[in-house]
Amino acid sequence: MTFDWAALRESTALPGTGGVLRQSPEDFRVEEVPAYLPSGEGDFVYLSLEKTGHTTAHVVRELCAQLGVRDRDVGVAGLKDRHAVTTQWLSLPAKYEARLGDFALPGVRVLQVARHTNKLGLGHLHGNRFTVRVRGAAGMAAQASETLAHLAAAGVPNYFGPQRFGLGGVNAEEGLRVLRGESSLRDPRVRRFLTSSVQSAVFNAFVSLRLERGVFDRLLAGDMAKKHDTGGVFLVEDAEVETPRAQRGEVSATGTLFGRKIKPLTAEAGALEAEALALFGLTPQVFASRKGDRRLVRVFPTGIEVQAHDDGYTLAFTLPKGSFATSVLREVMKTGVDVATVTPDSEDAEDDE
């Protein structure tokens, strides 16, 4: 279950640009695309923050310590990694607004403050805008543009990136011990994080198998497909009828993040999903402690831009929430993107990277 890009099939045969990432935090910028903006009035105060070298959790802890806010009263839409310059919204009860002038943390700037009617909730965002400098790839901007154009048309594998799997990519191993009742860990948040890594490992294997079998952009009988425009999910009964919609990018297959509230796929899609589970010696029943969910097999990067530099290039793109920029960068660069940068304090930044 150790994370390894080499075990996950690529979606294009186009040459990689190579290069290196994150020579400085400014080389990797993430801007949250909110689901809505604050209205200007209400019982909550929204803060737009720019952070350099801090996780979201660290900034929240500092806010609580400096302003006397309870952790559960701070609202965030998504979690951001510390190896980047990131911009995101947080919310607090309006009674703390007068104390905001006392908040100070090196590497953090308050960009905007406004009132709104509700607490910001996890997932209250459309996605994230990434601007990434790739160094050590001189003359490769045109290749990056070609690959990104292909991904924008055909979709990028919606793999969970190495951030989900922790230092050395081994979180799923401990997560499996949690699921089997063999772990001594008691912290509920840590247990959820580790077991989510197991779900992620199985999902990644399912996506890789679809690429291997040539059904990444197709639908199978028994698939639960999702409409990209409305978000509606439906059972695929006649794959031949529905596949043209998938090939036009209107719908895509989903994979199962196993749990007690999610039914496994059936028919041909279910057989492929069972094959992914069998790679790890698992059954759906082992995930009874998790709620479960569905996740798109592919996503489509938008707003693509590429700028050439003497030593490489900068690329920018937007992804929907829950998707990892590393999946796009891996296709463009064809390297083990970000595996070496994962640290013990990395967050479950599924909507970030």
Image (cartoon, rainbow, N blue to C red):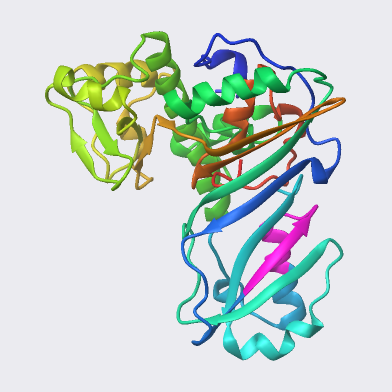
| Residue closest to the eye, 151 or 5 | 151
Q: In which quarter of the image is residue 334?
A: top right
Q: Residue 274 placed where, x, y %? A: 30, 20
Is residue 331 something that shows in the picture? no
Is residue 258 something that shows in the picture? yes
Say if 213 sits above or below 109 in the image.
Answer: above
At a point 25% along the width and 17% down the height, the residue shown is 271
At a point 24% along the width and 45% down the height, the residue shown is 232
Horizontal side, residue 332 vs residue 51: left or right = left
Q: Does the magenta stretch include residue 182?
A: no
Say if 179 sits above or below 77 in the image.
Answer: above
Q: Residue 141 placed where, x, y %? A: 72, 23
| Residue closest to the eye, 249 or 254 | 249
Q: In which quarter of the image is residue 281?
A: top left
Q: Residue 351 placed where, x, y %? A: 54, 47
Say if 108 sits above or below 316 in the image.
Answer: below
Horizontal side, residue 108 vs residue 209: left or right = right
Q: Residue 176 placed where, x, y %? A: 49, 32
Horizontal side, residue 266 vs residue 350: left or right = left
Say if 347 sits above or below 153 in the image.
Answer: below
How many numbered callouts? 0
Q: Quadrant of the C terminus?
A: top right
Q: Give the range drawn in magenta.
A: 47-61
Q: Is residue 55 magenta?
A: yes
Q: Quadrant of the N terminus?
A: top right
